[in-house]
Image (cartoon, helix red, strand yellow):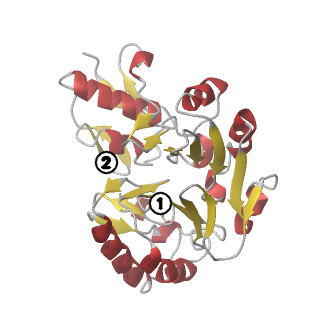
């Protein structure tokens, strides 16, 4: 069995640890291998980490990772798949495919671009829409949208990051954008941050909030809020009481599924905590993954 290691390109984005938390941990601001895989299931989880990592920093000492063990897109349940193949140009953010009852698919944020990957994702269904949560994740939106003949969506607050978007979300009011899918503008992380809610089940939160394994709760990334932490707190206060979901599916930070009533309580509590936050210098090392 190969001796796996993490090379020095790691940016501590947490993605690999999300897929193999028992095998990959964090130490001194970087990922490290906690132990070698002991069976086929663990080897497969390690390969998921490999093919998600945007720097390909998870590596076997001898040979190459097995392309046959690339699991992406990987189903999280019957309605959502995580794309993997995270992109350097989106700071390694996660992206997702949302299946619709009609058999079509929406892509939320974007993985690394390649025609081969695009065709692989399209095997899940015809992609009709590419939904951008905010400017940081816009890098490959136009290429995926054009490849699929899909509509590209972004909020007007971040329109300069995708000026050729086909659909522009405006203002602060929720907007229904497709079957069972609503866009909720949530300025704070960026001016044009948007949360997409689907079926009262899936919450694609972008970088507005995430599930922290450290605290075991929903959290905001207060040390990396580019636009305004006060605006983010106001957005959460305005929105928290109106959202119901089971899955939180962020761009950065971990995913989690809980009962919708529990998620509602946790989101309201997060809004109360966020109201106490004040601006601070950007510090990527302060994130509580």
Task: Kindly indicate the quadrant of the structure image that contains residue 217.
Answer: bottom left
Q: Residue furthest left?
A: 38
Classed neighbour count for the residue bearing mark 1: other residues with Cα under 10 Å, few (<14), some (14–19), many (≥20): some
Residue under numbered circle 1: 284
Which percent across, then down, holds residue 124? 52, 32
* Residue placed most toward the observer, 198 or 144: 198
Which percent across, then down, holds residue 58? 39, 31
Cβ atoms at labels 2 and 1 below 8 Å apart: no
Q: Residue furthest right?
A: 164
* Residue placed most toward the observer, 276 or 179: 179
- Left or right side of 15 for 216: left
Q: Is residue 179 above or below residue 39?
A: below
Which percent across, then down, holds residue 281? 53, 73
> Helix, strand or loop at disc 2?
strand
Mark seen at residue 26: 2
Task: Kindly indicate the quadrant of the structure image that contains residue 32.
Answer: top left
- Left or right side of 126 for 168: right
Labels in figure, total: 2
* Residue placed most toward the observer, 61 or 197: 197
Q: Residue at x 34, y 51 (%)?
A: 28
- Left or right side of 110 for 152: right
The quarter of the image holding the N terminus is top left
Q: Is residue 277 above or below residue 77?
A: below
Classed neighbour count for the residue bearing mark 2: other residues with Cα under 10 Å, few (<14), some (14–19), many (≥20): some
Q: Is residue 231 above or below residue 91?
A: below
Report how far apart the C-alphas of labels 2 and 1 lie in the structure: 14 Å
- Left or right side of 171 for 219: left
Q: Residue at x 19, y 22 (%)?
A: 39
Q: Which numbered disc flags the more N-terminal residue, 2 or 1?
A: 2
């Amino acid at each position: 069995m190969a001796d796996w290691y993490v090379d020095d390109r790691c940016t501590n984005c947490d993605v690999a640890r999300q897929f193999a938390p028992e095998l990959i941990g964090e130490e001194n601001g970087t990922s490290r291998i906690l132990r070698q895989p002991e069976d086929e299931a663990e080897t497969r989880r390690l390969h998921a980490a490999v093919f998600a990592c945007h720097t390909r920093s998870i590596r076997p000492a001898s040979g190459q990772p097995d392309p046959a063990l690339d699991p992406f897109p990987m189903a999280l349940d019957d309605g959502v798949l995580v794309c993997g193949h995270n992109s350097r140009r989106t700071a390694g953010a996660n992206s997702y495919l949302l299946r619709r009852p009609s058999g079509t698919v929406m892509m939320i944020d974007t993985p690394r671009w390649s025609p081969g990957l695009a065709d692989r994702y399209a095997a899940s269904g015809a992609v009709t829409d590419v939904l951008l949560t905010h400017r940081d994740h816009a890098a490959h939106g136009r290429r995926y949208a054009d490849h699929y003949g899909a509509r590209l969506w972004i909020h007007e607050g971040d329109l300069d990051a995708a000026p050729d978007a086909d659909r522009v979300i405006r203002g602060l009011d929720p907007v229904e954008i497709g079957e069972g899918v609503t866009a909720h503008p949530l300025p704070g992380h960026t001016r044009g941050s948007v949360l997409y809610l689907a079926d009262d089940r899936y919450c694609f939160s972008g970088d507005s909030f995430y599930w922290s394994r450290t605290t075991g709760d929903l959290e905001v990334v207060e040390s990396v809020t580019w636009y305004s932490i006060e605006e983010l707190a106001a957005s959460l206060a305005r929105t928290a009481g109106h959202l119901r979901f089971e899955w939180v599916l962020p761009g950065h930070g971990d995913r989690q599924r809980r009962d919708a009533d529990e998620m509602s309580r946790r989101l309201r509590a997060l809004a109360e905590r966020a109201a106490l936050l004040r601006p601070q210098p950007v510090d990527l090392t302060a994130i509580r993954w």
